[in-house]
Amino acid sequence: MMQQLQRVFKMIRHQKALRGLVQSYFFFQEHTDKSSYGSISEEDERGIERAIALAAPHAGPIIEVGTLFGHTTNLLAARKATDKALIAIENYAWNPFALPQEAHRLFLHRTLRYVREHANVSIYEDDAASFYRANASLRPSLIFIDAEHDYASVKRDIDWALSVNCPVIAGHDYLPIHPGVCRAVEEAFGTEIEVYGSVWVHHRG
């Protein structure tokens, strides 16, 4: 009886995290046909590889906005030239499993250990706005946008990329379930994008 009461008290104490886990579970179940929460489909991978190929002739690092668990980061690292830097931006503010920030950070560092040591990959541990302020004159060869999915945040990411003349601007989750992403992309580029699964790619040349 005492153990059961202790479990109940634990559930009450962690109800916010449990609520997030349940919401994530239902989201996964309802959208099994789409990539979500850091996962990428084979078609998404084609789009990412296309963006990397377009960026290859250009100088400057690849910037990944929103790293989460590092799945896309590893693909970017595997397909880019070894000497091209990849900066992965992650502030550990959210994850679908309600992991504490330090646990999320440890998970990501272990996932990316090899590419950080051997593929010129670094993690910028703050939010995108902070990165943009600190790197106003940086000209990346590619920015891949996959952090916050509301209109204002995606627009901010695109606006920064345009302001520094980034030649290849791409991102994830170009889907009706993310209307903010679709609106920001379409306002910026109209039909001048290539779409692979839920990945969009704009090449400025």
Image (tube, rainbow, N blue to C red):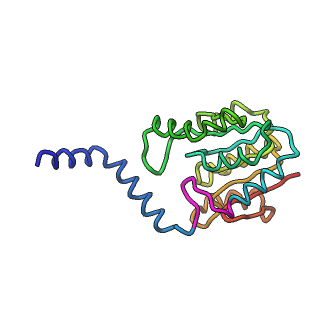
Question: Quick one: 16 or 189, which is closer to the camera?
Answer: 16
Question: Quick one: 200 or 149, which is closer to the camera?
Answer: 200
Q: Quadrant of residue 138?
A: top right
Q: Is residue 73 left or right of residue 193?
A: left
Taking the spot 58% from the left edge, 49% from the top edge, the residue there is 148
Q: Position of residue 50 (x, y in %)?
A: 78, 56
Residue occupying the far top of the picture = 134
**Looking at the picture, does residue 117 appear above or below residue 141?**
above
Taking the spot 52% from the left edge, 40% from the top edge, the residue there is 92
**Looking at the picture, does residue 135 appear above or below residue 201?**
above
**Looking at the picture, does residue 165 appear above or below residue 29?**
above
Taking the spot 65% from the left edge, 44% from the top edge, the residue there is 65
Residue 37 highlighted magenta (yes or no): yes
Taking the spot 46% from the left edge, 66% from the top edge, the residue there is 29
Q: Is residue 37 left or right of residue 18?
A: right
Secondary structure mostly seen in magenta is: loop
Residue 164 highlighted magenta (yes or no): no
Question: What segment is highlighted magenta in the picture?
Answer: 34-44
Question: Quick one: 129 or 13, which is closer to the camera?
Answer: 13
Q: Position of residue 155 (x, y in %)?
A: 68, 51
Question: Looking at the image, how many numbered discs can be counted on the residues?
Answer: 0
Q: Is residue 112 left or right of residue 193?
A: left
Q: Position of residue 152 (x, y in %)?
A: 62, 50
Residue occupying the far left of the picture = 1
Q: Position of residue 156 (x, y in %)?
A: 67, 46
